[in-house]
Image: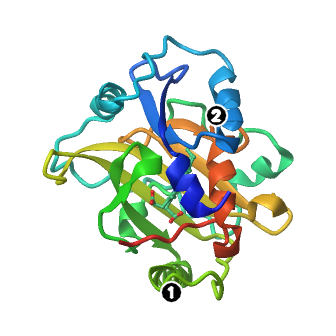
Amino acid sequence: MSPMRCRLRAGLWLSLAVLGVPAVAVALLVAAGPGTSRLAQAQSAPPQAAATTPSPAAGDSAQAADTAGKGAPDAAPAAPAPAAPAPAAPGPMTSAASGTTAGNAPGQRISWGTDYRTYAKVTGYVNSLEHGNRLGVTYASPAEGATIYRQNSALVRENKSGGFSNYPVGTVVVMETWLKSASGAPTTQGPIFFMRKERGGFDPEGRDWFYGFTDAKLNLIAEGRDGRVTFCRGCHVSVANRDAVFAVDR
Ligand code: HEC
């Protein structure tokens, strides 16, 4: 699935009420077609709390997610990470390589990437259809990863289909999302999306990325091989030539 088709196909709203985080309904705009089966898996993944009705109009579910994740428009920056050191290599998530869902249980604070606001900001507000039609702002660390993101973004802007660089192991890329007003201005903060580059061999076909996402307060919704995040990979590998990172800054 090409990135463009990926985007064009993103016409289906689904909301996912997450077990253990009853207040958080996560609305994601996902690709129809190949992505659908993955999302179906995600949906049928262990036990569903009362899901909000899928709404093609999307406003409700987005609202629900964003309200759940709330925080004022001028929400304070994410709380500084406690002792959680940004793992150079796989770090605390190494056990993920064994195929288990490592780290925190849903509802607990994510254990990595929490200090993302100290990373280099690599995009402005990008209108992200695939992430709930919200505005996304992306951060990357370490510096080398951020540099590659920017270089790849430049190639994307020039419509290049090749010449992209791969990210070093340990790179963490985080996109926070914002609901937008009618005029397109960011309002309430929504879910936060994380990816971290693992050592080669972790998931070669997926370009070795480990995915996770949280509510606006960094409480984990799912990560790793949890069925609720496999669809992240499903869409991101459509840009395997960009090392599965879209690197869009428009
Ligand atoms: C249907 C396709 C699709 C799905 C599913 C998807 N993404 Fe994305 N993602 C994108 C696109 C496209 C971008 C670039 C910004 C934009 O245009 O939305 C992006 C951007 C990102 C970024 C910023 C880095 C980059 O790629 O430029 C992160 C981090 C991210 N997604 C994580 C996730 C996580 C975590 C999930 C699952 C919970 C997920 N994504 C699910 C399509 C998708």
Could you say where residue 223 lies in the image, as x and y percent from the top left?
A: 62, 42
Specify the color scheme: rainbow
Residue underneath mark 2: 39
Q: Position of residue 131 (x, y in %)?
A: 44, 47
In the visual, does 131 lie left or right of 49? left
Front position among marks 1 and 2 = 2
Quadrant location of the C terminus in the rendered image = bottom left
Q: Residues within 10 Å of mark 1 (few under 14, many from 20)?
A: some
Relative side of 109 to 95, left or right: left
User: In this rendering, would 67 be left or right of 123?
Assistant: left
* 51 to 116, vertically: above or below: above
Residue at 55 percent of width and 78 percent of height: 145
Provide residue 43's location: percent of width, then percent of height: 62, 25
- Residue 34: quarter of image: top right
Vertical order, 158 against 219 (above or below): below
- Residue 63's disc is none
Q: Which mark is residue 151?
A: 1
Mark 2 residue type:
Leu
Q: Quadrant of residue 166?
A: bottom right
Q: Nearer the viewer, residue 244 or 32?
A: 32
Q: Is residue 200 left or right of residue 145?
A: right
191 vs 8: above or below: above
Q: Quadrant of the N terminus?
A: bottom right
Disc 1 to disc 2, C-alpha distance: 31 Å
Of mark 1 and mark 2, the one earlier in the sequence is 2
Looking at numbered disc 1 in the image, what kind of residue is underneath it?
Gln
Task: Name the residue nearer the viewer: 212 or 16.
Answer: 16
